[in-house]
Each structure stands twice: as C-alpha cells, then as structure tokens.
Image: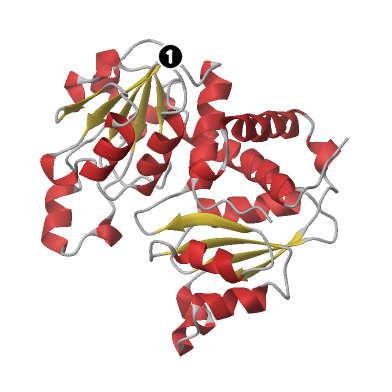
Amino acid sequence: MKHLLNPLDLSVEEIDEILDLANDIEANPEKYAHACDGKKLATLFYEPSTRTRLSHEAAMMNLGGNVLGFSSADSSSATKGESVSDTIRMISCYADICAMRHPKEGAPMVASQYSSIPIINAGDGGHQHPTQTLTDLLTIRSEKGRLHDITIGLCGDLKFGRTVHSLIHALVRYENVKFVLISPEELRLPSYIRKDVLDKHNIPYEEVVRLEDAMGKLDLLYMTRVQKERFFNEEDYVRMKDFYILDAAKMELAKEDMLVLHPLPRVNEISVEVDRDPRAIYFKQAQYGVYVRMALILTLLEIKVS
C-alpha cells in the first residue's frame, strides 16, 4: 500500500505522472466525475485548516466519492486521550483513504504504520506538507512550462514553514534550480535543511534579509506568512509578523514574467493591491490544489480512468 508522507515518497517520474493526470483532470473534469463512486475519504484534521481540508474534500466529491471526518482535535476522541494509532485503526473500518493534519511532527507516519488504508500527510507541525508541494509544482509547471532552470525566492518564515521545507526537498531534484532565501535572522532556514539538502546536492543558494535586494533576480517569488501558532511567545511573533510586506512598489522591481505564489492563508504579507497584478497567481494556485489532490487520490487508490 502506498502512502504520501513526504514529497520524497514519490520519484520524479511518479510526480510527473500525477501532474500529467492533474492537467488532464483540469481539461476533462467530466471524464473523472464518477471515478470514486462508492469510495470514502476521511479527513482527520487535528489543527485548523481551510484550503487543505476543503480542497481534499472537494477533490473527493468531484470524483464522485464521499467524505467524513473532523476539523479539529476538540471534536474528536483525541480529547479523551485516544492515540493516533487507535484512531486510524478505527477510521480504516470506515473509509478507503485518509488525509491527516496534525500539530506533532511524525504523526501521519505513526498512523501509516497502523493503517489498512492509504494515508495522505496534510501537514505535520513544521515538518512536511507534501500535497501543498504537489500543488506548487503543478502551478509552476503549468504557468512557467517547466520545473528546471528557475530561480525561486522563498520569503518569510523559512524556519517553521513546512511548505517551504517540502518545496525545497522536491525542487532540488530538478536541474539548474537556484534558491534565494529571504528571511530575518530569527526565521532563517534550519541548518539541517541547508546542510543535508542544499549543500549535500550542491544546490546554489544565497541568503538575504531585504526583499528588495532579491526581486530583480527571481523567476518565482514564494511568499509565506509568519505563523503565530509556531511561536513560543507573543512578543516574538509581534516583532516578526510585519517584517515583509509585498506591495506594488516592490513588484515594480521584479521581472515582467516573475510569478508570485503563496500557500495561503495570507495575513498582511501581501498587500491586496498586488492581487490586481497578473503575476500574482496565488488564488489560481489554490484551484490547482484541487486538481492535484484529485490526481493523488486516484493514484493512491490505484484507480485508472480510460
């Protein structure tokens, strides 16, 4: 049985197949409208989510399937002390596939060891977010036409940002990808990712503090919010939350074909005036997330549509 816990669980060839399937789903939605008739997706979300939970549910419903689950730990038996391993054993009796988000790193991996159905990691702490990574890859490939020969700026919370960590793991497998890491000192990319991923694969990167210093170099700018829920105290969060704000003036420094991505939700790190810029594609990115999760569900359930 196949699970998706980490972007590296999929080979480059498997990722390409999922992205190709997602493109076909986008072009021919009616072809897949009943592919999962009679199938059920369980969404086990132990922490809040809008896009990730609803896009998984929309994906399954678009395929003709049904959904069940919970949207917070408070509405589950976790409040009574039930373990993840026991929960997944029980859910395996009710559903055919499961998407799990959990604040503790490694929780979806624990679930996979006790599950009799495929597990999708929908985000675990500050660790990995592989379905967002697939969404990002589909967005980049669809809008840029390639996943190689790009310079991508990662801006904001690079320390706790699981979307950033997952995307780096995925993109280092493509040729001629360069990273510009834009963050304050306190939110720098963890040293283990710099050493074990970037340095280990001889991937070129530079670290800058000012967003203005990076804008003109980039093919893609991946903005992230400073995550209040990852901070240990309110004072540090307040000090960091407005460190970067992308506005129209900064966009004037960028290439005409540079694209702006954001995993969302945004707080105030992207001014609403940027929404009108055709290079801002973060809401389109959210739509790509539905297509890629449809493709992933079909792949993990081993359902072929001819």
Tell me where residue 238 appears, x and y as whole percent. Answer: 15, 54
Q: Is residue 26 left or right of residue 264?
A: right
Residue placed most toward the observer, 68 or 16:
16
Q: Is residue 257 left or right of residue 115?
A: left
The answer to whether residue 165 of the structure is visible from this angle is yes
Report the residue at 75% width, 28% height from top: 27
Q: Is residue 81 above or below residue 183?
A: below
Quadrant housing residue 153: top left
Report the residue at 33% width, 41% height from top: 224
**Residue receiving disc 1:** 149
Q: Is residue 125 left or right of residue 289?
A: left
Give the color scheme: rainbow, by chain, secondary structure or one colour.
secondary structure
Tell me where residue 304 appears, x and y as whole percent. Answer: 83, 41
Name the kind of residue labelled 1 in the image: Asp
Quadrant where the N terminus lies? bottom right
Tell me where residue 285 appears, x and y as whole percent. Answer: 52, 34
